[in-house]
Amino acid sequence: MVGVAGHPEAANLAYLGLYALQHRGQESAGIVSREGSATRVHRGMGLVADVFDEGALASLRGRHAIGHVRYSTSGESSLRDAQPFLAASSDSQIAVAHNGNLTNAQAIRTELESYGSIFQSSMDSEVFVHLLARARGRLEQRISDALSRVRGAYSLVFLVDDVLIAARDPHGFRPLSLGRLGNAWIVASETCAFDLIGAEYERDVEPGEVVLIRRGRARSIQPVPRVAEHFCVFEHIYFARPDSLVYGRNVYLVRKRMGRELAKAQPVEADMVVPVLDSGAASALGYAEAAGLPYETGLIRNHYVQRTFIEPEQSIRHFGVRVKHNPIRELVEGKRLVVVEDSIVRGTTLTKLVTVLRNAGAREIHVRVASPPTTGACYYGIDTPSKEELIAAAQSVDEIRDALGADSLSYLSLEALRRVEASMKHGFCDACFSGDYIIPIDQIEEAESQLGLFDPSGE
Ligand code: SF4
């Protein structure tokens, strides 16, 4: 998710920003731009590079733009669910891009439909545009009224006429950062988007804060009371790009520290440490350094296969797991390996990797996981599978080790993970590991529909 305010090439910058954020969603992409009183939109299914061509970008004129890449945490997989959403109220054009997952969207939607609102998509995010379109008063008041109605996880970028608005839920589940490029303002889910366009990171949007950028000036309001922070630890473990600052910390260095903690608590006699690329690389390096073992890229990753974790097509996911990693036989043959992975969700990817490493002649395979066992689903905007599909929800560590075919298996403990996150002096959510859901599961209305969309196969 990206927003640009006050730059003559706003849509081009949004396009580049989305390019940097492609890992956050590969199902669809879109940009809305604003020039004078004209609002333009281009959206499509697939990767950013496929959705936009020169003609599409040239049509997105104006000094303001917002963009979005999507994977489905709720809603269907179709063009009508591609963001940003666009709607007109009696006196303004409203576009919104949302990262997160609302926990009371269906109740709001039912109420709004009873008043005559007509929804164009199956997405929870669309309630924002309808709430805003129905609200009355000054823009700040309308935003406050709309946000006070929703619960759950949201980082949002709105374009209301020529005002760019960035908002983050009071818990701060999902990241959102502010940057500057000359006189222009940039908003992005991760700071790697700033790096690509040469923008300077200014600060994070605070939990519960709304930043309105109007005629080059930013104004901050806090329309919903601030509550305890619940920054998603999974952003640090897996989701975010390692070159990003997330919650003010470099993701690569956080992962490395997790790997070091893992090595201290779970050492093993071995010849080398092998990462599961890409997200396991930093923690594997941390593990290798702390353990005094060589770090070797024993598994080569084919980068032209999309991330299986968020790929919604079942057949492609199976295909992806098989073609994605290939071992270097000459390196691993006869060796005792520590294979470091960032997390285990269903276990299917890792089972196949252990098999290919055995077939390549590895003598011992010790799997080390740089996060605790994933035992619960996420209701706050990360596409984890339902609890029933999580291998650690039903099986013990020994059973998982046997299912993987590994010689040993150990995880980073919850206590160690909490030590790492707490040292960064922010509150955090670790509910999918601990079961400590800040919004109780019985109050999460769309759990059923959200989880029904997850692909039952793959990692
Ligand atoms: S439940 Fe897990 S993935 Fe979801 S917000 Fe909390 S830590 Fe992140």
Image (spheres, rainbow, N blue to C red):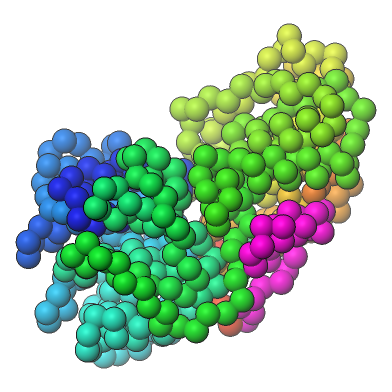
**From where the camera sits, is residue 351 visible?**
no
Q: Is residue 439 above or below residue 458?
A: below
Q: Give left or right: position of 435 versus 164.
A: right
Residue depicted at x 49% and y 31%: 305
Tell me the quarter of the picture where residue 113 sits: bottom left
Q: Position of residue 378 (x, y in %)?
A: 60, 63
Q: Residue at x 80, y 49 (%)?
A: 412
Task: Return the x and y of residue 109 as percentages of the image width and height.
Answer: 36, 81
- Between 270 and 390, the one nearer to me in the picture: 270
172 with respect to 389 (left or right): left
Q: Total label count?
A: 0
Residue at the (64%, 79%) spot, across then down? 440
Residue 239 position within the rendered picture, expressed as x and y whole percent measured from the top left: 56, 48
Q: Is residue 430 magenta?
A: yes
Q: Is residue 38 visible?
A: yes
Question: On the rendered structure, is 69 left or right of 254?
Answer: left
> Which stretch appears magenta?
413-442
Which residue lies at the image location 29% right of the left edge and 86% below the top edge? Answer: 141
Where's the C terminus, which quadrant?
top right
| Residue that sits furthest to the top in the current view | 330
Q: Nearer the viewer, residue 394 or 409?
A: 409
Pick whichever, 362 or 315, lies toward us: 362
Q: Quadrant of residue 370?
A: top right
